[in-house]
Image (cartoon, grey):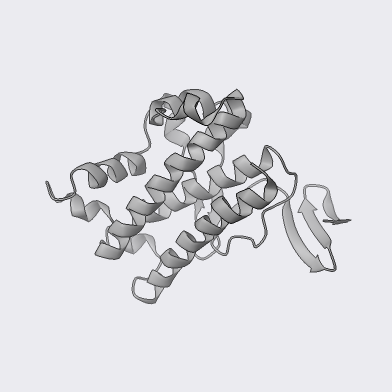
Amino acid sequence: MTKEEFLTKVWNYYLMLEKDFMNTFQYVEPSVDNNSAYSKEYNKLLLSIGSEIDVVFKELCKKIENKNSSDVENYNITNYMNVISNYNNFSNENCTNLVTREIISPFTEWINSKTPLWWKNYNHLKHDRLSNDNIKLGNYLNVKESLSALYIICRVLYKTSYSNEPIPKSNLFQMNNWPVYTELGNGFLQVADEHGLSFYAS
């Protein structure tokens, strides 16, 4: 996948989902107090985000294992965990929610070889939406955590080939302990990391 393909097919789709989620902040205050708030919009978002996570996980597995699409076609969450969990300390990756300042670690359950709860809830909603109050799984918390997971997967996939940050940047999340890139115009970037600020041409 070229840089242009990633930005067009993966990153822009992520940004669209992020925008749709942030639009709900007009009606549901982004707060842990509203974690259980559910709606048809959150149902739709969780199903869309979960489906895209599956797509991007496959791309990351292809990259890590140097395989073709047909080789990973039937991979599931267990396969993803086995391939990705120990890749560059992936299970410990976390990001900050720039709106609420929460630190979100969506893959820590992988450390104990467990499936993340937000993924289980996505699957319950996907396969049995009309039973056992599963419609309530389309809630603020599951959408927030699954979207943060998609953000991290996208950033890790991009980092396998490119050193900088995909532009435009996320308006909702920022990776923790990663360099932060800022466009300065005229093809120049500012990089903030543990060594301070540096500048280079993009």
Q: Where's residue 184, x and y in %?
A: 81, 67
Q: Residue furthest bottom?
A: 26
Left/right of residue 174 with respect to residue 200 in the rendered view: left
Asked if residue 7 can be seen in this view, the reply is: yes
Quarter of the picture containing the N terminus is top right
Instruction: Judge whether 78 appears above or below 121 on screen.
Output: above
For image coordinates 41% across by 49% down, the residue present is 146
Q: Is residue 50 left or right of residue 185?
A: left
Residue 90, quarter of picture: top right
Residue that lies at the very extreme toward the front in this rendered image: 70
Regarding residue 39, the answer to whether it shows in the image is no
Which residue is at the front of the view, 34 or 6? 6
| Horizontal side of residue 76 vs 71, given as left or right | left
In the rendered image, the vertical position of residue 45 relative to residue 86, given as above or below: below
* Residue found at the far left of this picture: 131
Q: Report which quarter residue 44 is drawn in.
A: bottom left
Please give the name of the residue rendered at 38% of the width and 46% of the height, measured from the top-left corner: 50
What is the x, y in percent for residue 161? 71, 39
Picture residue at 33% right of the left edge, 51% below the top: 47
Q: The C terminus is located in which quarter?
A: bottom right
Q: Nearer the viewer, residue 10 or 30?
A: 10
Write the residue at 68% across / 44% down.
2
Q: Position of residue 136 (x, y in %)?
A: 21, 55
Seen from the viewer's position, the closer of residues 119 and 15 is: 15
Instruction: Examine the rendered structure and indicate whether residue 118 appears above or below residue 199.
Output: above
Residue 88: name its quadrant. top right
